[in-house]
Every structure is written in C-alpha cells, then in structure tokens.
Image (cartoon, rainbow, N blue to C red):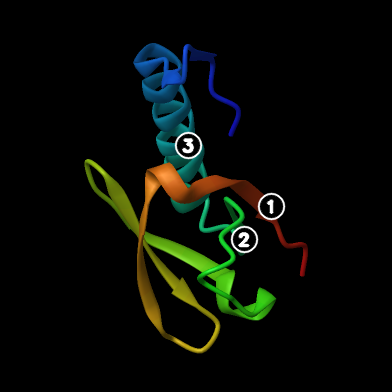
C-alpha cells in the first residue's frame, strides 16, 4: 500500500481509507466464497510459501481477518499487512 508521507508521518486519512478498502474487498471475497491468494506487504522477517496464502476468508473483524489456507490452517491477518487479493480461477 502506498501511504502519503509528510515529514516522515503517515497520513492517517490515507491509512484508514486503505484499511476500509481492504475490508470491503475481503467482505466481497468472503460473501462470494472465492478461492483467493492474499497479497501481503513485503516482509523479509516472515518468509511465506505462496501456497500458504491460497484459500478462503473465513471471518472479518475490526482489525483483522481470519484466513484458512488449502492445508486447513487458519491465520489471523491484520488488515495493515494485506496489500490485496487475487482471485484463483479453478
């Protein structure tokens, strides 16, 4: 996600708008039961296998969503680390 930075400070309006957009997209994906890949912000400290983040959104909360991958492992993902979703055609 791109944030507007002024003097090293992230604009909260932009941050909150991005979070609201991610929540809206997540709600759409969950309501249509789409098989998706969650696209995360780059994080060198958390290596993730691409298949780990292919699955279904199984819950949406105030600050995070619950995601269940194809191995039936559930992850709680904070909205701030989600960059978007990619629908997997099957």
Query: Which circle's residue, 2 or 1, is located before the other in the chain?
Result: 2
Decide: few, some or many residues near mark 3? Use Cα within 10 Å; few <14, some 14-19, many ≥20. some
Q: Nearer the viewer, residue 20 or 25?
A: 20
Horizontally, residue 88 falls left or right of residue 69, namely right
Q: Which residue reaches farthest left? A: 62
Question: For the residues marked 3 and 2, what is the alpha-carbon distance in whole angstroms?
Answer: 14 Å
User: Disc 3, disc 2: CB below 8 Å?
Assistant: no
Query: Which circle's residue, 3 or 2, is located before the other in the chain?
Result: 3
**Element at label 2:** strand
User: Disc 1, disc 3: CB below 8 Å?
Assistant: no
User: Disc 2, disc 1: CB below 8 Å?
Assistant: yes
Residue hosting label 1: 86
- Given this view, does label 3 or label 2 mark the residue nearer the observer? 3
Q: Find residue 22 and name its label.
A: 3
Q: Residue at x 47, y 36 (%)?
A: 22
Residue hosting label 2: 36
Q: Is residue 65 above or below residue 10?
A: below
């Amino acid at each position: 996600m791109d944030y507007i930075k002024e003097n090293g400070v992230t604009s909260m309006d932009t941050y909150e708008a991005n979070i609201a957009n991610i929540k809206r997209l997540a709600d759409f994906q969950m309501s249509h039961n789409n098989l998706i890949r969650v696209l995360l912000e780059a994080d060198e400290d958390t290596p993730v296998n691409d298949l780990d983040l292919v699955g279904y959104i199984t819950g949406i909360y105030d600050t995070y969503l619950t995601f269940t991958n194809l191995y039936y492992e559930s992850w709680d993902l904070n909205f701030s680390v989600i960059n978007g979703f990619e629908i997997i055609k099957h």
